[in-house]
């Protein structure tokens, strides 16, 4: 495997990690949700994790079937919503329900992208001759 073939995915994951961490930190700092060094680290970790999810869900050639994508999408929503709640609940002025709502809202796009790309791949392969249930 050439150096370019391994560097490109790493750069892509690094870009999304840094971009989402920066955006998350900027938004949290603007609203006063960053308290101390530990708070900043938690916000950056949350944003970076979200960025990794975006990078994985938008990857071009994931070999996962639709069922695995659906399972990972659901797990992603649960884990990232819990992570968001843990990071932002102590500094939020909103209720627990509002914090959970925003956690789900931010976790939703990567999960939906992952599942929709699986549906598109499944539709492309199911329309080919020889791929039907009677073949």
Image (cartoon, rainbow, N blue to C red):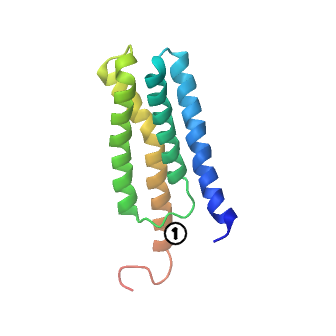
Give the side of residue 118 with respect to residue 70, left or right.
right
Q: At which x and y percent is residue 82?
A: 33, 35
- Residue 26 vs residue 75, the one in the foreground: 26
Q: At which x and y percent is residue 73?
A: 39, 50
Tell me the quarter of the picture where residue 5 sits: bottom right
- Residue 22 vs residue 132, the one in the foreground: 22
Say whether residue 15 is visible. yes
Q: Which residue lies furthest to the left in this view?
A: 96
In the rendered image, the vertical position of residue 9 relative to residue 18, given as above or below:
below
Mark 1 lies on a secondary structure that is: helix
Tell me the quarter of the picture where residue 83 sits: top left
Q: At which x and y percent is residue 88?
A: 39, 24
- Residue 133 vs residue 15, the one in the foreground: 15
Residue drawn at (59%, 46%) of the image: 14
The total of numbered circles placed on residues is 1
Quadrant position of the C terminus in the picture: bottom left
Give the side of residue 97 with respect to residue 27, left or right.
left
Residue drawn at (59%, 39%) of the image: 18
Residue at mark 1:
124
In the rendered image, the vertical position of residue 100 relative to residue 58, given as above or below:
above
Q: Residue furthest front?
A: 37
In the rendered image, the vertical position of residue 75 relative to residue 81, given as above or below:
below
Q: At which x and y percent is residue 127?
A: 49, 74
Residue drawn at (43%, 34%) of the image: 105
Quadrant position of the N terminus in the picture: bottom right
Residue drawn at (46%, 84%) of the image: 130
């Amino acid at each position: 495997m050439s150096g370019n073939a391994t560097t490109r995915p790493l750069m892509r994951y690094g870009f999304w990690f840094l971009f989402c961490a920066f955006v998350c930190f900027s938004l949290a700092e603007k609203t006063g949700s960053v308290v101390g060094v530990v708070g900043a680290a938690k916000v950056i970790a949350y944003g970076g994790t979200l960025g990794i999810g975006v990078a994985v869900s938008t990857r071009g050639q994931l070999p996962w079937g639709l069922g695995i994508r659906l399972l990972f999408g659901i797990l992603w929503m649960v884990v990232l919503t819990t992570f968001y709640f843990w990071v932002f609940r102590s500094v939020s002025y909103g209720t627990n329900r509002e914090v959970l709502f925003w956690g789900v809202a931010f976790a939703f796009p990567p999960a939906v992208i992952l599942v929709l790309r699986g549906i598109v791949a499944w539709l492309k392969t199911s329309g080919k001759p020889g791929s039907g249930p009677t073949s």
